[in-house]
């Protein structure tokens, strides 16, 4: 019944906000179309479609709000006006009571809160749909931030997800337009994303990895996780002190070099992408602060590690080669790369793909190189590739979205930021390291432990190779030999019979010739 009531509410909201027109305009079933007309008599749809979708998601609650936020990143699927509107979704929700937060912490650690913390602030710093954050002090005096998962989330999420799957199936079955949006694939991705976010240990582990990766760069601070106090529902980390990046005025007054800050942001991002293949993918301004403490003055502070992207060597190579070819306006190379990497079917005509890529990329060169948005270029490449049956990899979509965020942030800090010149050395260095002597040595170094392991085993492996074959294999070989001998015998008989026949024939001919 609960399920049914929620489903009715969802369908009602979809119709009230006119979303049936957005995704279901291609309804094939006349009866359904008629029913929708009847139910929606008298509704006014004077707001733009994107705004209607955003309001509907807000009405349906936090899980749908999150869904809208994730959907807004799929600019390769959505029209720009809808994606822009969805990106405005805020998932600030009223906090759950401090008493409940304390209880959840006590349940997670199995002891009273006083046994863990010297103090625990009742008022949360922030409260979002998945979790809320409280400041606290440990017994040894260290200041910490405690992130607590909102109670009962798993049940709500699983219910809403199963309804979303049902809706997605309906959309796919009844609407041609809707099918193009790949609703089931999108809900599937969202399901994975939400379940990842619900496990706070994953977030803590992401933070620890990023902290290690960024340690030598001296440009960004990542809070240390207190592993003894990290569970899947509560994590405790070092409390950071910084000024939100959006408060540029305050930062400038404190003496921070804003233009350097903009360049550093790009450097950090490209290091994460092209050196580590592991990047913070939730770079909205709320998650970024800047330190003004003397020891770490001007460094970024990264928060919230629920979403990270990972790239394989293959992805990195694809990206850097494509970017470099793009900036040389070598569209043929871009097209060839797509075919070589197996991204488009091997039967694709390179010249056709080249033409499509040229059409989407060339307009970007209308402006100075420094103003070109790499995020936009990547998006256009995805859009061009889609027409050639390319399935865009989710990690690349995540990267493209983060790239847009980083560029947006950089330009906000410094409208003159030359993104290409900041990014180019990274791509070139990466290519050089991959292709050159250093790349070879690096790969050899990576493989060396495996060789070291294999070498002592070599005599045994050789001996094994020279040993008589195991019984089963031996039997198979014998059976094959018997079969071969049988075939040989048969062949022999056939040859003899054939020869006999020929000899007989020739003999008969000779006898006939001489006797007659
Ligand atoms: N280690 C920390 N030190 C200081 N403040 C923190 C720390 N972690 C989180 N905060 C504060 O709590 C806020 C929310 O944290 P976080 O983004 O991790 O939570 P969230 O529930 O994932 O929120 P959202 O989904 O909106 O990003 C941050 O914007 C910051 O103000």
Image (spheres, helix red, strand yellow):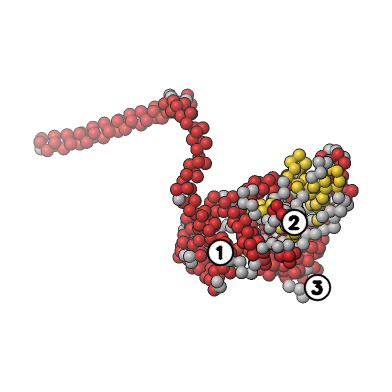
Judged by depth in the image, the label closer to the viewer, 2 or 1, is 2
Disc 3 target residue: 43
Residue 383 in picture, x, y percent from top left: 58, 64
Give the distance between the C-alpha atoms of the residues marked 2 and 3, in whole angstroms: 48 Å
Q: In the image, which is nearer the foreground, mark 1 or mark 3?
A: 1
Residue 419 appears in the figure: yes
* Percent of width and height locating residue 5: 84, 57
Disc 3 crowd, CA 10 A, few/some/many (<14, 14-19, 20+) = few
Q: Secondary structure at mark 3?
A: loop
The circle drawn on residue 242 is: 2
Q: Is mark 2 within 8 Å of ligand 1?
A: yes
Residue corresponding to mark 1: 420
The spot of residue 158 in percent (x, y) is 77, 50
* Residue 340 image position (x, y, % from top left): 47, 55
Which mark's residue is nearer the viewer, 2 or 3?
2
Dot 2: what SS?
Answer: loop
Residue nearest the viewer, comparing 450 with 91: 450
Nearer-N-terminus badge (2/1)? 2
Quadrant containing the C terminus is top left
Q: Nearer the viewer, residue 259 or 431?
A: 259
Give the residue drawn at x 64%, y 69%.
415
Q: Residue at x 72, y 46 (%)?
A: 224
The total of numbered circles placed on residues is: 3
Viewer-side residue, 148 vs 4: 148
């Amino acid at each position: 019944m609960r399920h049914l009531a929620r489903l009715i509410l969802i369908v009602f909201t979809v119709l009230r906000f006119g979303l049936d027109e957005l995704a279901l305009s291609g309804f094939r079933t006349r009866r359904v179309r008629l029913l929708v007309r009847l139910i929606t008599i008298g509704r006014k749809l004077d707001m733009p479609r994107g705004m209607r979708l955003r309001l509907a998601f807000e009405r349906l609650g936090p899980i749908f709000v999150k869904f809208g936020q994730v959907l807004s990143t799929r600019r390769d699927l959505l029209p720009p006006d809808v994606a822009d509107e969805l990106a405005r979704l805020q998932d600030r929700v009223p906090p759950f009571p401090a008493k409940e937060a304390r209880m959840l912490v006590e349940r997670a650690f199995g002891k009273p809160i006083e046994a863990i913390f010297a103090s625990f602030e009742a008022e949360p710093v922030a409260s979002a749909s998945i979790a809320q954050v409280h400041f606290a002090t440990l017994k040894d005096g260290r200041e910490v931030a405690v992130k607590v998962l909102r109670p009962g989330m798993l049940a709500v999420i699983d219910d809403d997800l199963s309804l979303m799957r049902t809706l997605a199936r309906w959309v796919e079955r009844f609407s041609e337009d809707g099918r193009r949006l790949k609703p089931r694939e999108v809900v599937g991705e969202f399901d994975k994303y939400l379940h990842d976010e619900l496990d706070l240990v994953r977030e803590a582990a992401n933070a620890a990895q990023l902290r290690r990766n960024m340690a030598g760069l001296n440009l960004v601070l990542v809070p240390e996780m207190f592993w003894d106090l990290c569970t899947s529902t509560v994590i405790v980390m070092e409390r950071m002190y910084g000024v939100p990046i959006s408060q540029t005025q305050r930062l400038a007054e404190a003496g921070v070099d804003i233009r350097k800050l903009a360049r550093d942001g790009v450097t950090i991002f490209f290091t994460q992408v092209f050196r580590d293949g592991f990047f913070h993918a939730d770079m909205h301004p709320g998650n970024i602060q800047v330190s003004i403490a003397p020891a770490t003055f001007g460094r970024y502070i990264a928060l919230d590690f629920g979403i990270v992207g990972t790239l394989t060597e293959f992805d990195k190579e694809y990206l850097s080669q494509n970017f470099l070819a793009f900036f040389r306006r070598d569209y043929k190379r871009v097209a060839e790369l797509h075919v070589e990497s197996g991204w488009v079917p091997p039967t694709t005509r390179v010249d056709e793909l080249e033409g499509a890529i040229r059409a989407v990329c060339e307009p970007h060169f209308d402006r100075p190189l420094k103003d070109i948005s790499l995020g936009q270029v990547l998006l256009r490449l995805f859009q061009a590739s889609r027409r050639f049956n390319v399935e865009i990899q989710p990690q690349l979509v995540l990267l493209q979205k983060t790239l847009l965020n980083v560029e947006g942030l950089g330009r906000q800090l410094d409208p003159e930021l030359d993104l290409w010149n900041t990014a180019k050395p990274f791509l070139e260095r990466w290519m050089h390291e991959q292709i050159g002597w250093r790349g070879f040595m690096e790969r050899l170094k990576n493989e060396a432990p495996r060789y070291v392991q294999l070498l002592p085993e070599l005599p045994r492996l050789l001996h094994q190779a020279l040993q008589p074959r195991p019984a089963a294999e031996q039997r198979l070989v014998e059976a094959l030999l018997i079969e071969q001998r049988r075939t040989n015998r048969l062949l022999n008989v056939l040859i003899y019979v054939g020869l006999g026949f020929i000899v007989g024939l020739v003999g008969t001919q000779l006898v006939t010739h001489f006797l007659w």
